[in-house]
Structure formats: structure tokens, C-alpha cells
Image (cartoon, rainbow, N blue to C red):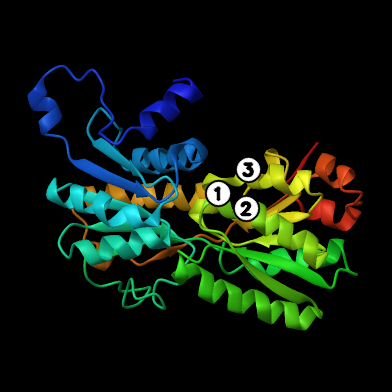
Amino acid sequence: MKRRDFIKVLAGSTAMTWPLGADAQQSAMPVIGFVNPASAQNYTPQVTAFLKGLAETGYTSGRNVTIEYRWAEGRNDRLPALIADLVRRQVAVIVATATPTALAAKGMTTTIPIVFEGGMDPVRTGLVSSLDRPGGNITGVTQLNLEVAPKRLELLHELIPKGNVVGFLINPANAANAKGETADVEAAASRLGVEIRVLNASTERDFDAVFAKLAQLKAAGLVIGSDAFFVSRQEQLAALAARHSVPAVFENRQFVVAGGLMSYGGSLTDAYRLAGVYTGRVLKGEKPSDLPVQRGTKVELYINLKSAKALGRNIPPTMQARAEELIE
């Protein structure tokens, strides 16, 4: 399937449909409800990884399982309605990707199994009772994007050691992520002797004001917080950073491919694959309460050397050596 056709399938709000032959065969399939607060266009690698994990347990979309995708298009306020529709349909499993989705799903049902994926601390946010024994109807996978946010600041400081002021972009609509991540980044800034200025954006309209503020502050660079809305707008953020000559660091490779300077974060594809495996195990009859929350451990650094040159920055050889990939 071509990438653009795959995206069209994912972008639909109804189930993926395939030539199955008999209606009875289709109706006998279990249905997975897959919910994400962003848009399909920027999540093709993650969804592909999820399907790979699902296949490892013997499930293939369109053959013996149906997947209904729901995308909130960057509007977290749409999540409860999207999940409520899946609950009414009595899907077999709800896959809740990103923290706001997981929290919304937990509040919607105590009976339908939920498999989450996100960068949050699931105990601190109240999703599970403990990592080893989640309890209830929910389990899932965490990656390190929130926890390594201070490292993004450290990388930026390593590149621009004389930069005294750095912007930190958060989405105030995602309070569960923003509060803890901001505290961690501010603590790292204090150790480094850097002043952090927190900037807010929850819609595209906010971005111009963010970059105008960075210019006003004469900020050395920008660290972008972990948030599905920012992932869905990463190409726009990369373009704005380039246009305003702002060295920026985000969480994943796509940002760097789009022209962003650097990314550092947990492997989203690894986390989504593990979520796919857990979804398949739940479909086979295992209880979420018996499946310990898994923790992705792979962390990746990507650097765009062309963007660095355009910004007048030389990437130290030691930093280049640590990179998973250098993009030119």
C-alpha cells in the first residue's frame, strides 16, 4: 500500500475496510478502537509499528481483527466524545495513545480493556495502581519522552553554552504532561545556570506569538515539550524555527527530517510496537490487570547537519558520534 493511501485509511473515522467476502466473517472479528489526540498524517510510522506488534501475536487488520481509528486533530476536548462512541460500540479493546487519551478512556469505561501508550508516569497520573500490578481494566506502555526533556535542554546548552535564556514550549491544554515536564526542565535549567521562559501554545494560532516572544527575549534556542499536538504540527514548528533562525530540539526524528535542528527522545515506534503486542494478548484473553506496565528503554538522538549549518552552528564531533542518525 502506498504511503498516501495508507494515510487516507488512517484518517477515516470509521473502521478500516477490506474485501472480506462474507458479512458474517467481518462481524465475527474483534474490533479495536485506536484513539490519538493528533492527526493521522504524522503517525504513519507509529501506526505501522503498532500493526507489527499486533501481528506478532497473530492478528492482522482486515483478516482476523478490525481497527477503528479516531483522530482528535489536535483538539483534546474531542477525546471524550470519540472514546464514548467506541464504548457505545462495545469494541473489544481501546488503544489510548498519549496521556490525555489514556486519562479520558479511563474515565469512560471500567469494563472494556484499555491499552495505553504515553510518556507519562502512569502511577503519578492515576492511570494504574502500580507498574507491576496495574489493577482494573488498564495497562500499557510508557516511553521516555517526558523523562528525557531535561536532556534536550542539556543538548541545546552543550551546543550553545553561552545562551542564558531558553524558551520551553508546552501545551497548557495537556496539563498532565506540562506540569511535571516543566518542573523537570526548570530544575535542569537551574543546574546549568540557564533561565527558562515557559511559552504556551494549544492552537496553531499561538505559534507566531511564541516565535515573536523568543525574538523579544533574545532566546538562545527552544526546547519543545512532549505533546501529541506538537507532533501533529512538527513540520510547521520546524519551518518556523528555520524561518526565525531558532535552534530547536524536539522529541522525534520526523521533526529533524522536516528541518528541525535536533531531536532526542524515547523511540515511539518501539513503544507502539509493544502496545500492539499487549493489544493482541488482551484479545487472546489475558487481563490487563495481570499485564505489568512495560517501559520502553530505547532513546534516540537525531541531528540535521544542514539546519545546523544554516543556523551557523557547528555540531561537535562528540555529539555527532552519539547520534542515531545525521541528516544532511
Which quadrant: the C terminus? Answer: top right
CB atoms of marks 2 and 1 within 8 Å: yes
Real-space CA distance between mark 2 and mark 3, rounded to the nearest whole angstrom? 9 Å
Q: Position of residue 183 (x, y in %)?
A: 59, 79
Q: Earlier in the sequence, mark 3 or mark 1?
A: 1
Real-space CA distance between mark 3 and mark 1, rounded to the nearest whole angstrom? 9 Å
Q: Position of residue 325 (x, y in %)?
A: 74, 44
Given the image, on which type of amino acid does mark 1 rest?
Answer: Glu
> Which residue does the image show at 70% across and 46% down from the upper left?
240
The residue under label 3 is: 236
The residue under label 1 is: 204
CB atoms of marks 3 and 1 within 8 Å: yes
> Which residue does the image show at 81% across and 43% down from the upper left?
307
Q: Earlier in the sequence, mark 2 or mark 3?
A: 2
* 16 w.r.t. 50: above or below: above
The residue under label 2 is: 207
CB atoms of marks 2 and 3 within 8 Å: yes
From the viewer's perspective, tell me whether residue 192 is left or right of residue 118. right
* 6 w.r.t. 311: above or below: above
